[in-house]
Image (spheres, rainbow, N blue to C red):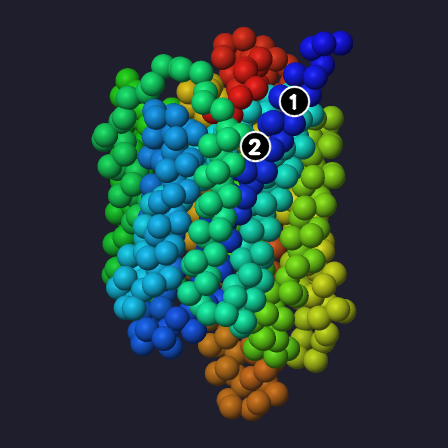
Amino acid sequence: MPSSAPATAAKDHRWLGLAVIAIAQLMVVLDATIVNIALPSAQEALGFADEQRQWVITAYALAFGSLLLLGGRLGDLFGRKNTFIIGLIGFALASVLGGFAESFEVLVAARALQGVFGALLAPSALGMLTTTFTDPKERGRAFGIFGSIAGSGAAVGMLLGGLLTEYSSWRWCLFVNVVFAIVGVIGGAILLKTPPRVERPRIDVAGVVTITAGLVGIVWGFSAAETDGWDSPLAIGLLAGGVLLVTAFVLIERTVAHPLLPLRIILDRDRGGALLAISMSSIGMFGIFLFLTYYLQGTLGFGALQTGLAFLPMPASIMLSATQIGGRLLPRVGPKLLIGIGGALGATGLLLLLRTGVDTTYAGTVLPALIVIGLGMGLIFSSAMNTATTGVARQDAGVASATVNTGQQIGGAIGTALLSTIFADALSRGMTDAAGDPAASAEALMSAYHTAFTVSAGAMLLVSVAAITLIRPHRVRQARLAAAAPAGSSTGSVPTVAH
């Protein structure tokens, strides 16, 4: 009886720590979309050209996506609590710099710095979650909450961006990060415990250089393809160079004594399937946010704030699905079934958007689709993030978490470029056939939207395929994890302190 109070306090302590981690994760995720809403106002205030506007988004994606693996390993090396707090402080200072920017160059530099510190922060947040919650039932609930934040942060960013832009200033879309950071730093310093010492890995310099340059090439290459076309020399050169450097990275990791990314992390069938599911779902997500935003504003005439509010049912259903369904069922039925169903639900919701038209209503067409998509995304993110970080040794938790974030970023970059190009090609063909007729032009635009939604649905179906073909059945996974636990994996009996 006397021991129950400390045990309860420790448990409550962990859940308060999860709240801090979730707040920090929300700041990083929503920053990918909150600035999008503010871009027109920022462009008017700073006077930069349309062709420069993309760099406000690309600078963040380039720095964030390319440095995640290094950020994860730095967390393993110096302690994830330390890198978590440093990442929060740096992100806040970069946001202040961007909020006070009086030129395009300063704004872009601030966004790049946000990406740098976000790459330090995000793997630390997920890594601490991985090593703090080890009981399968508690872990399922914790990852349900975390997954709901990861899946709905983009929609929250659109709503918050609309509110701040309409009622305050575009600069507050950057200043607001200071509020998140202050809560995260204070809460992290008080609630997140200093982890036990483990063997510190050495930095794989050759691996850092090749993977960072390779991911820069890939992310920048997809961005260039979106703006300049897939046949542009810049896009082709960047993508080819990026792929070659990533290939060189894999070869290096097979031979060095202290690899940046131990290949066993991604070659495991369960983790590989979960990572693929995360990447493919990120591609599908951009079909929702990018083109549904265009439809709501361009066709239905919604304003920025109204568009943000229109997306709210989706994060609500993501949270419901991730915490009350995925978080509870994952320990019982395993990720294979839940991710498979999630992908099918996501595809179904996207196909429901094919009912949209020039004269259709939000309540009759968009709302049901958003709810179904949210239910699917909640199952995918809560289950896939949990699976991708389960069974990883404590000293590799940071880099494993970084791999999850990298999959999201690369998937998002591919989705933006690929779907934008497909949409533009479909719209160009439709407008040519319309020959200037207003009614035919409106239908051509809807047809292009539907093409993008269909391709996004295909990406969601690939999530189900990855789950069914790669992830092991639940009983087999449980047996393997139980056998591996004594070897020091994060599923074993590890101290319940944040790491």
Amino acid type at image mark 2: Gly
Mark 1, secondary structure of its residue: helix
Q: Residues within 10 Å of mark 2 (few under 14, many from 20)?
A: many
Where does the image place residue 105, in percent across and percent down from the top left? Answer: 26, 64
Q: Which mark is residue 9?
A: 1
Residue 464 occupies which quadrant of the picture? top right
Q: Nearer the viewer, residue 268 or 371?
A: 371
Where does the image place residue 295, in percent across and percent down from the top left? Answer: 59, 72
Q: Residue at x 41, y 36 (%)?
A: 85
In the image, is 443 to the left or to the right of 78? right
In the image, is 24 to the left or to the right of 234? right
Using the image, determine if residue 90 lies above or below residue 160: above
Residue 175 occupies which quadrant of the picture? bottom left
Mark 2, secondary structure of its residue: helix
Q: Which mark is residue 343?
A: none
Amino acid type at image mark 1: Ala
- Can residue 280 be spotted in the picture? no
Q: Earlier in the sequence, mark 1 or mark 2?
A: 1
Q: Return the residue at label 2.
A: 17
Where does the image place residue 478, in percent across and percent down from the top left? Answer: 65, 18
Q: Residue at x 48, y 83 (%)?
A: 432
